[in-house]
Image (spheres, grey):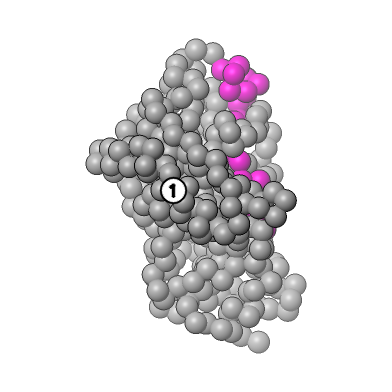
Amino acid sequence: MAILRIGSRGSQLALWQANHIAALLRQLGHQVELEIIRTTGDKITDVALAKVGTKGMFTKEIEDALAEGRIDLAVHSLKDLPTELAPQFEVVAITERENPRDVLLSVKYAGLADLPQGAKLGTSSLRRQAQLKEQRPDLEIFPLRGNVDTRVRKLEEGEYDAIILAAAGLNRLGKTQFVKQVLEAELMCPAAGQGALGIEIRSGDSVMREHLKFLDCEAARRATTCERALLNRLGGGCQVPIGAFAEIKAGKLTLLAVCAKPDGSRVLRQLQTGTDPLELGERTGLLLLHAGGDEILKEVYGSAAAAPQQP
């Protein structure tokens, strides 16, 4: 049996994810090798992601390796994968989803409501910044880059009073000791695809498709397809102030979507239901655009975004 070569970023979380998929493949008798690939997003560590604004900044170099045949499949955090793939690639599987919500971490404080006036909070996400500012305009928000370990260490050392991270990464790495509050989607709408892994292959690679189809989770695919359809309708990458959270309830899809000004002065929300993931995502995206989302996004794209300042 041929060796399956997996391409992955080199961060601790990315390697956990790639090794998780590798272990599942090995259980079926496959031989697996891992190739670590450094992406643009990994190389730029001193600038808030919103200021970089490159779609595919965590995936392009991995896709190059896939196109050149150096790897057979790529394991991505789905939220990092652009909503429009080049024709030579396909997402063959979307894995069962971890908790898609964001969480607040703090050493001293019990939750968002307990943070004192003017508290320092770390995040480099405009989506998180906007929703935080809507609820707590008094907070001072500063950029937070680096891998999960680095971010948690900065919190522990007192650089921030609190930080916001995705629950999924912390759960996977077992680094939940400072999690004080799980932020429900109504309070902090997550990023499209958060908590799911996307397995990417070369289009038409029927052998790989057959090997990997067992990884595909129908519920996760339906929910994330809906979220990504909304994001695609709004023309957004992973660093614009857009949130999307789809759930299957009694056989129907419910989609909560948010589009916001980075300073939190205007936050648009839509809650819609449907049965077709693509239709629901696109319809909800159009409703947001017509409600003023087009103006918000023009402003964000035109200004390279008001990213958090350095502390």
Question: Residue 160: horizontal and vertical position, in percent?
Answer: 50, 25
Please say whether residue 100 is one of the residues in the magenta stretch.
yes
Viewer-proximal residue, 172 or 245? 245
Question: Residue 232: horizontal and vertical position, in percent?
Answer: 41, 55
Please say whether residue 237 is one of the residues in the magenta stretch.
no
Residue 13 in sight from this viewpoint: no
Chief SS of the magenta region:
loop
Left or right placement of residue 66 versus residue 164 in this view: left
Residue 265: quarter of image: top left
Residue 69 in sight from this viewpoint: yes
Magenta region, residue range: 96-115
Q: How many marks?
A: 1
Question: Residue 288: horizontal and vertical position, in percent?
Answer: 42, 42
The outermost residue toward the bottom is 1
Residue for point 66% across, 68% down: 215
Question: Relative to 160, does residue 86 appear above or below in the rendering?
Answer: below
Count residues near mark 1 (Cα–Cα under 10 Å), then give few for <14, some for 14-19, many for 20+: many
In which quadrant is the N terminus drawn?
Answer: bottom right
Q: Give the labeled residue for mark 1.
A: 285
Viewer-proximal residue, 51 or 95? 95
The amino acid sitting under disc 1 is Gly
Question: Relative to 223, does residue 75 appear above or below in the rendering?
Answer: below
Question: Residue 127: horizontal and vertical position, in percent?
Answer: 45, 38
Viewer-proximal residue, 255 or 188? 255
